[in-house]
Amino acid sequence: MRRLLPRRLAVTAPPNGANMPSKIQPVKGTREFYPEQMALRNFIYSKVRAASQAFGYQEWDAPFIEPIDLYAAKSGEELVKKQSFVFKDRGGDEIALRPELTPSLARMVAAKQGELTFPVRWWSFGPFWRYESPQKGRSREFFQWNIDLLGADSPEADAELIAVAATFLRSVGLDPARATVLVNDRRLMESQFDALGILPEKRLEVSGLVDRRTKMEPAKWDAYALEIGLAQSQLEGLKSLLGNLDLWKQSEELVRVFAALEALGVKEYVKFDPNVVRGLLYYTSTVFEAFETSGSVKRAILGGGRYDNLLADVGGSPLPATGFAMGDVVIGIVLQEAGLVPEFVPSPAPVLVTVFDPSLWLASNALAAELRRAGLNVMVYPEPAKLPKQFKYADKMKMRVAVTIGPDEAAKGQVAVKNLLNGEQVIVPREAAAEVIRKIL
């Protein structure tokens, strides 16, 4: 029987001379996950989960849509007004597709602050949306790993999060020659801004200036610095401190961070960089970003830091917190360019049970059910067809074993097991089939 399509999607042949209906394209900046792309996303998720759980973090999630007010006072004007997907619901309230997770985390922890066991270690991997210009390494819809430690106020806690990031990088095959985590401290930078005479009301703009340094031509960056109100002497002083790679030694917190990273066995992944400040308003001390050093994508793989004030901003009691986020787009490109993505296997079932003819169709399904009960992933060809066609299908799906019940095998309680890698075939008792297949696999 022909399957009926929903009425609004029904496909009919146009009359002679009529235009073909136009194809409805996906929304700009969104992504379609065919099985091969889904395999990459699941590979990233599996490594994210393993790194998170290795350090004792629990998985959680929050709503995909939130009131825009949740982000308005905490994430910065650019994220709220220019990068969020915002709409009014039927009650007239402004709602946003979540552009980030930390404000939701803060609200949820604040709501149960008297019930949770601290320190809280939580991680999540889910979809987010930002209305940005789609380009390599950036889309409007993406999946993101968020991992946070709340209730621990120490540089060693910051070091733990950096170690989680380094553990992930190592697990996907990115060694320290290919990836590095750059670390700075906002309080250290504040003290340096004080020394340069940069007024407190200028600090946000100057932090943005520092954040843009690697993204602008030097002459244009200098001009922009003067444009936002820095004196020439302040500009020269700023450039000098941004080139001082020993500046971290003046920070007690960073000295402790690097000592902890050495104890955690990941110091080779980490470097101090005074140019790392992070753009969001809520970071208060340690900040860090990870980059791949040799590929075509110059965007950060992940980034985060300490944010001690956010919980109080959403109605909770003050609580120290640290964490980071990693989108799946940049790391996916990095892994593909580095040849670190596992080979795509089209079928998760390595075993195909063929259908010899219509009279043995049910017998093939019954055999497949037996093999599944024995713990094997098994696919049944969906219709009787010539066996060479079925074997060709199994080869295209990179399956490793084909099992056939023909009339002779059915009469004798046997099955034919074919190794698709070398072409060898054996006839075995039906009850022995699962063990024979396991040896091939």
Image (cartoon, grey):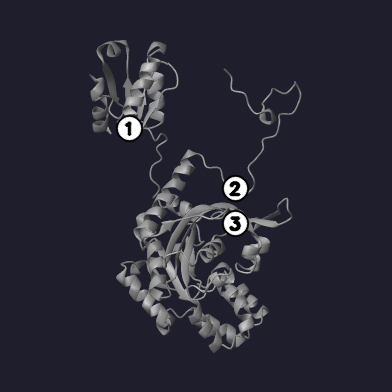
Q: In the displayed structure, would residue 36 be above or below residue 150? A: above
| Residue hosting label 2 | 30
Disc 1 packing (10 Å; few <14; some 14–19; many ≥20): some
Residue at 23%, 32% in the rendered image: 439
The residues tagged by marks 2 and 3 sit, at their Cα atoms, a distance apart of 15 Å
Give the label on residue 329, or none. Answer: none
At mark 1, the secondary structure is loop
Q: In the displayed structure, would residue 264 be above or below residue 440? A: below
Residue at 66%, 67% in the rendered image: 77
Q: Nearer the viewer, mark 2 or mark 3?
A: 3
The x, y position of residue 161, in whole percent, is 41, 66
Dividing the picture into quarters, in which one does residue 252 lie? Answer: bottom left
Dot 3 or dot 1, earlier in sequence: 3
At mark 2, the secondary structure is loop
Quadrant (top left/top right/bottom left/bottom right) for the C terminus: top left
Q: Nearer the viewer, residue 51 or 268?
A: 51
Please state which amino acid type lies under the numbered disc 2: Thr
Q: Nearer the viewer, residue 52 or 203?
A: 52
Q: Is residue 173 shown to the viewer in this render?
A: no
Residue at 37%, 23% in the rendered image: 391
Q: Nearer the viewer, residue 223 or 160?
A: 160
Query: In the shown orientation, is residue 360 left or right of residue 66?
Result: left
Query: In the shown orientation, is residue 171 left or right of residue 83?
Result: left
| Residue hosting label 1 | 376
The x, y position of residue 165, in whole percent, is 41, 62
At mark 3, the secondary structure is loop
| Residue hosting label 3 | 98
Please state which amino acid type lies under the numbered disc 3: Arg
Q: In the displayed structure, would residue 20 be above or below residue 250? A: above
